[in-house]
Amino acid sequence: MIKYKQQITQAADFISRHIGRDPQIGIVLGTGLGPLAEEIKNARAIPYGEIPNFPESTVKFHNGRLVLGDLVGKSVFAMQGRFHYYEGYPMRSITLPVRVMHRLGIKTLILSNAAGGIRQRTPAGTIALIRDHINLMGNNPLIGPYDEFLGERFPDMSQPYSKRLRDIAKDVAAELDIPVIEAVYAAVSGPSYETAAEIRMLQTLGVDAVGMSVVPEVLVARQLGMEVLTVTVITDQALPDKMLPVSHEEVSNVADQVGPDFRRLVKGVLKAL
Ligand code: HPA
């Protein structure tokens, strides 16, 4: 526990030496939002591999980096690439960056990701604001020895995704003429995609979209009292009676196509904050 606390402080101290202005907003740039990092002004980029105690880079992460700077006038701590549970990292490592953000004074977290839509009303290309979630990862980043610095032992989850931020996002989307829906998200461990029987189960549970990230970060952010907005791109539609093979390539292509609207929306939200 002391070690975890030290890991967080060491990483935060290291990053604060690279910061011009105190970051106000944390952003995790998932599939489709990555290019937003290129629009950050006065940017200082730090490869994850150089930050003490950040999980060790896997091949996929050769360009995973933290970008600090100004985006539409807001000082941001942007993660270009995130750590996933299916890569084999412990939950505490995946969520260490969120604890570092909190330590640096960040109170607002904007997350993005790709997910599969499992309803008629969630075709590929849909942009969804996550309204609530079901954690089916079989693990929780808050499990483990407890210390006050982590936040509350039993954090409330009655409103993990801020209604205030969702309302702002909906207003911005309407102004920009970008259709958005609200969705209940289920997080699974992956890395295999779902079977037809699993999709049917998720539908019965009231799920609209399924993916392999976000929830660990949200649980930690809420434990620390941070306000969270999650914007998801539905990259593929999985309906149990007409299952089509899903590929990572398809997921990436759809995320790229939706990318421009997705980025306009997130910038609009930042501006409005
Ligand atoms: N299932 C799980 N995760 C995903 C999917 C999916 O269909 N699409 C993108 N991430």
Image: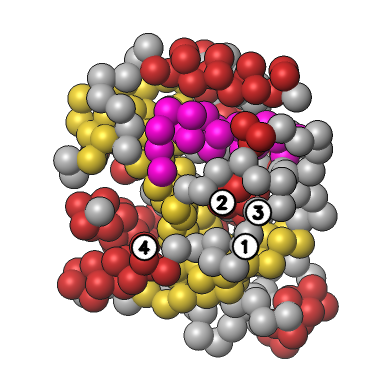
Distance of label 1 from label 3 (alpha carbons): 6 Å
User: Mark 3 — residue?
Assistant: 155
Q: Label 3 is placed on what type of residue?
A: Pro
Label 4 residue SS: helix
Task: Give the answer, above or below, for where 29 lies relative to 75.
Answer: below
The image quadrant where one finds the N terminus is top right
Q: Label 4 is placed on what type of residue?
A: Leu
Task: Give the answer, above or below, for where 81 lies relative to 163.
Answer: above
Q: Which mark is residue 222?
A: 2
User: Mark 4 — residue?
Assistant: 165
User: Within 8 Å of ligand 1, the CB of disc 4?
Assistant: no
User: Mark 1 — residue?
Assistant: 157
Distance of label 2 from label 1 (alpha carbons): 8 Å
Distance of label 4 from label 1 (alpha carbons): 16 Å
Q: Is residue 150 left or right of residue 160?
A: right
Magenta stretch: includes residue 213: no
Label 1 residue SS: loop
Residue 154, horizontal then vertical, whole percent: 71, 52
Q: Which residue does the image show at 48% across and 35% down from the upper left?
A: 102
**Predominant secondary structure in magenta?**
helix
Distance of label 3 from label 2 (alpha carbons): 7 Å
Q: Earlier in the sequence, mark 4 or mark 1?
A: 1
Q: Label 2 is placed on what type of residue?
A: Arg
**28 or 259: which is nearer to us?**
28
Crowd tier of the residue under label 1, counting other residues whose Cα lies within 10 Å: few below 14, some 14–19, many 20 or above: few
From which residue to which does the magenta span run? 90-107
Crowd tier of the residue under label 2, counting other residues whose Cα lies within 10 Å: few below 14, some 14–19, many 20 or above: many
Label 3 residue SS: loop
Give the label, 4 or 3, closer to the camera.
Answer: 3
Q: Label 1 is placed on what type of residue?
A: Met
Pointer 2 with pointer 1, Cβ within 8 A:
yes
